[in-house]
Image (tube, rainbow, N blue to C red):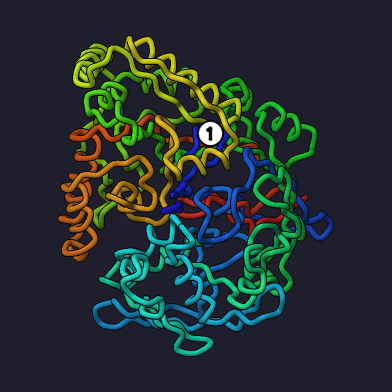
Amino acid sequence: MKKSKFSLLLVFLLVLTIFVSACSGKQSSDKGTASKDSKQEATILESQEMPAMDTIQASDTISFTTMNNVFEGLYRFNDKEELVPGMADGEPVANKDKTVYNIKLKDAKWSNGDPVKAQDFVYAWQRALDPEQKSEYGPYMMVGKIKNADKVYNKKAKPDELGIKAVSDKELQITLEKPIPYFQSLLSFPTFYPVNEKFVKEQGDKYAKTAKNLVYNGPYELSSWDGPQATTWEYKKNEKYWDKKNVSMTKLTFKVSKDPQAAVNAFEAGEADITPKLSTPAIISQYEGDKRMKRLLEPTVFWLKMNQGNKSLKNENIRRAIATAIDKEAFVKDVLQNGSVAAYYQIPKDFVHDENGKDFRDGMPKYLETNKDEAKKLFEKGLKELGTSKVTLNYLGDDSETAKTIGAFIKDQLEKTLPGLDINIQSVPFATRIDRDKKEDYDLQMAGWGPDYLDPITFSDLFITGGGNNHMGYSDKKYDQLLKDASGKLAAKPEERWKALQEAEKVLLQDDAALSPIYQRATNYLINNKVKGFVIHKVGPEFSYKWMKIEG
């Protein structure tokens, strides 16, 4: 979210928003009533630029969050974290085995006055699976879920054979490969949003390149955005939006501030109403107990990705040595100092629970715990297997100060623990890192994922062989089979399905040491006390501004 939310969506972060997917954080909102005397405008700081506004090309939190506010799918999560109709006119009507859904649409309009039609959804979904578009999230979110998605993506079926049909201008029929318990939650994610087919074709290659090359059907419009390198952009209220009466804000201004102290200074000077995630320990400690600082432990996990396209990292002993050489407890205590917790898992705690309230993590062991002596032995063994005495790896990170600090910690931990290992830090802009990740142009990289929908498979699906978000060359037949079973024959058997997903996590971490979990993120924001109704979502796109108001 995520998503899937490559996500699915990766950053080094805290000051950063993730690749990820995704999206994360315990749902939170501060309600209020807009004062008639208050100007309904606000300035929000972001830690990075916004890389994409094409719903099938985005894989980062900032882009997904904007899409959630300027577009709208069939359903959306509201300010109470309830799934409610968006473009849909009520609840879907399903067949007996819940594989065919009919959904009627509201009389809604695009910002240019065109009606939102069922065909806009059909075209959008088909476009997401067009291999020429090279979408990550299209296949990730649809294959194995929407009927014939895999065949369409691999050109073994025509686009019109995809399991979505326009029954009429105002009714859709969606056919699934199998029953999916979280189906409606999926439909709230940007990959499933409609696009105006006529407008897209008119724009050609210019589509979604700037604010002027887009039309909107959500609460807001992008009134300015000059593309991925832009350091400022603005929303304005969408007067064509079907529910505009419940949108109070008339203007939202976004500015990129990569310097945490500069962001705080702007907040204190009244130049910003919401800061990016606070990352500097000194800043966080300064605001402990201040009601303007909000802290949330998110269902977002960060791990060290190890690209097996690199010969050295293809060696399991080298990977396992790296995975166990990093002191995760020291990392969260001494580097982050923000409430984050060390992670020994890929699927977060306090995220999903079974029908009896049992957490997915209950009873699960810790994986890849720090053991520097053993890590050294494993590394020496790996070097012998490779026939070398030295390995040099490039660590790809963002160019924010926080990302650089994190990179320096990883370098120090690995080089001191594993003699013969040299780490070169490569700091690049956020958008560049995402592009290089997609091309698998890195050796090591700190990546994160927040859930795109409320199910553990939103994490597990990331690393299936050839998956749209598997940018590290990982492949394991047992892992793939467990995921196939969880999505297929076990779909209607919740207990067995969870066991399969738990076993898959064991294969990924304990058996293969494919990546090294580092921490589960806690985030801290500074929010002006006058801001009410600012919603932080647990899954999917991170924020909603639809219900935001300025009071007082």
Residue 344 coordinates in the image, percent (x, y): 30, 31
Give residue 240's quadrant in the image.
bottom right
Give residue 147's quadrant in the image.
bottom left
**Residue at the spot x=44%, y=66% of the render?**
130
**Residue at the spot x=50%, y=22% of the render?**
425
Instruction: Report the front residue among 418 and 81.
Output: 418
Instruction: Report the front residue among 89 and 20.
Output: 20
Q: Residues within 10 Å of mark 1 (few under 14, many from 20)?
A: many
**Residue at the spot x=20%, y=47% of the render?**
479
Q: Is residue 274 left or right of residue 488?
A: right
- Amino acid type for the residue under numbered disc 1: Leu
- In the orientation shown, which residue stands out farthest toward the bottom? 168
Give residue 430's quadrant in the image.
top right
Q: What residue sits right under mark 1 in the picture? A: 14
Q: In what element is the residue under mark 1?
A: loop
Where 346 sits versus 156, above or below? above
Residue 5 coordinates in the image, percent (x, y): 44, 52
Q: From this viewpoint, is residue 236 visible?
A: yes
